[in-house]
Image: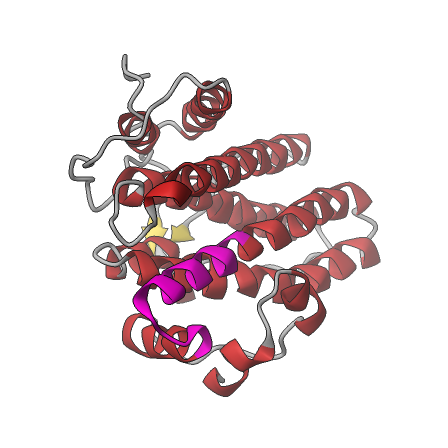
Amino acid sequence: MADTTDITALARAVLETADPHEKAKQAHAVAALWRGGACTIPETAKPVADRPARPTRPELVAPGDVPRRRLNGPAGRIALLHAVAHIELNAVDLAFDLVARFAADKAIADERRHDFVSDWISVGDDEARHFRLISDRLAKLGGAYGDMPAHDGLWDAATATRESLAARIAIAPMVLEARGLDVTPGMIDRLVSVGDTDSADCLRVIYTEEIAHVAAGVRWFRHLAARAGKDPANWFKSLVHKHYGGALKPPFNDEARASAELFPEFYQSLT
């Protein structure tokens, strides 16, 4: 880990760690330092690389080339959990990239800057725990992260929003993580239907905690909109049109989204 109290430098150290398990370990360590009051927020942050460090495996392929298998056998459940592990590892980097890239951004009110860092450090800590949870479950099924190809769609979205905090918040938590709220209950039901209640329980943990992550995105997007003098729902839609490469896919989990205060006026017209 970087020998510094600068939270943006510590976040960059997480991003620069290639080994996924070491990345998760570093994420937990940085979160502990921040919560212990050992870190500072600089007035300006150093540039952040466009891409985080990645292990040599898994192979990254086009989304349509990622293998899909039926869940009624171990190979299908391993494929599903491998995809979830990949999402969670990317989510670790997305959270720490928010801190490294945007903690000193002038779009955030000075008096709210500490709260901004606290929220996204906490999200990154959760995502690292989720990655470890799914990795452990994969191991019990005879698999491991890196065994199968994965796609890079999440980081493509991060690259597209690297110049704008508002766009990053709109796309990462409010589109991509919110999509997880829509699809995860169905994944849980499918796992239960084939008797894999242990994997279903792992996804239940993730699903419950992701609601708070989406809520953090909504909270900070509203903060940015108020500072910019913009209507939050209309601004969100304009940013999605500009930075997201497609319409949003229904059906939506309106109940879970409402729990995160992401209401239909934000997303319903974007289908």
Q: Nearer the viewer, residue 218 or 110?
A: 110
* Vertical position of residue 135 compared to residue 68: above or below: above
Q: Please tell me which residue is depicted at 19% across the width and 41% down the height of the picture.
A: 49
Q: Nearer the viewer, residue 19 or 68?
A: 19
Q: Quadrant of residue 6?
A: top left
Asked whether the viewer can see residue 203, the reply is yes
Residue 104: where, in percent of width, then height? 26, 41
* Vertical position of residue 52 compared to residue 106: above or below: above
Q: Please tell me which residue is depicted at 55% across the width and 65% down the height of the picture.
A: 179
220 relative position to 155: left or right: right
Q: Quadrant of residue 268?
A: bottom right
Which portion, as a residue range, is magenta? 216-233
Q: Is residue 218 magenta?
A: yes
> Can you name the residue that lies furthest to the top here?
3
Q: Is residue 122 magenta?
A: no
Q: Nearer the viewer, residue 205 or 136?
A: 205
* Vertical position of residue 25 compared to residue 188: above or below: above
* Vertical position of residue 180 compared to residue 20: above or below: below
Asked whether the viewer can see residue 93, the reply is no
Residue 52: where, in percent of width, then height? 28, 39
Residue 148: where, in percent of width, then height? 46, 45
Query: Please, what is the dominant secondary structure of the magenta stretch?
Result: helix
134 relative position to 98: left or right: right
> Can you name the residue that lies furthest to the left here?
47
